[in-house]
Image (cartoon, rainbow, N blue to C red):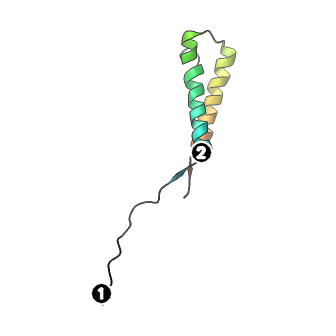
Amino acid sequence: MAKANKPVNNSKPGARVSFPGVLMILLGADLILLLAPDVGILNSGFYIPDIYTWPALIAGIVLLVFGFRSFYRKP
């Protein structure tokens, strides 16, 4: 009796994405887009002092860095 050939699976296993990583990336990108000094969306309509915009830009960059570091998890 002949054995049936098993299908060969050469694909990579799927990567899992962490939910807190996605939230950190979205929050960081929103902070940068809304409050970036001189080019942010809120700065185009309102005057927001630099004392608020520069820390928001730095916090947005930090959130993006930590969000991308914890973005993928092993399955």
Quarter of image, res 37: top right
Q: Say above or below: 7 vs 4.
A: above
Can the viewer see residue 40?
A: no
Q: Residue at x 57, y 16 (%)?
A: 42
The Cα–Cα distance between marks 2 and 1, rounded to whole angstroms, is 48 Å
Residue 68 coordinates in the image, percent (x, y): 57, 42
Residue type, mark 1 in image: Ala
**Is residue 71 shown left or right of residue 13?**
right
Picture coordinates of residue 59 (x, y %)?
A: 65, 29
Q: Are marks 2 and 1 in contact (CB under 8 Å)?
A: no
Which sits earlier in the primary sequence, circle 2 or circle 1? 1
Q: In this view, does 64 lie above or below 32?
A: below
Secondary element type, mark 2: helix
Q: Residue at x 66, y 14 (%)?
A: 50
Which quarter of the rendered picture does the N terminus lie within?
bottom left
Q: In this view, does 52 lie above or below 2?
A: above
Query: Of the residues shown, which amino acid type is indicated by label 2?
Result: Phe
Q: Residue furthest bottom?
A: 1
Q: What element carries label 1?
A: loop
* 10 Å crowding of disc 1: few (<14), some (14-19), many (20+): few
| Residue at the right extreme of this rendering | 51
Q: What residue is at 54 percent from the left and 17 percent from the top?
A: 41
Vertical side of 28 occupied by 44: above or below = above
Residue 51 position within the rendered picture, expressed as x and y whole percent measured from the top left: 69, 16
Q: Mark 1 points at which residue?
A: 2
Q: Is residue 42 visible?
A: yes
Number of marks: 2
**Quadrant where the C terminus lies?**
bottom right
Tell which of 2 and 64 is nearer to you: 2
What crowding class fits label 2: few (fewer than 14 Cα within 10 Å), some (14-19), or many (20 or more)?
few
Task: Please give the residue where the numbered disc 2 appears in the rendered image.
Answer: 19
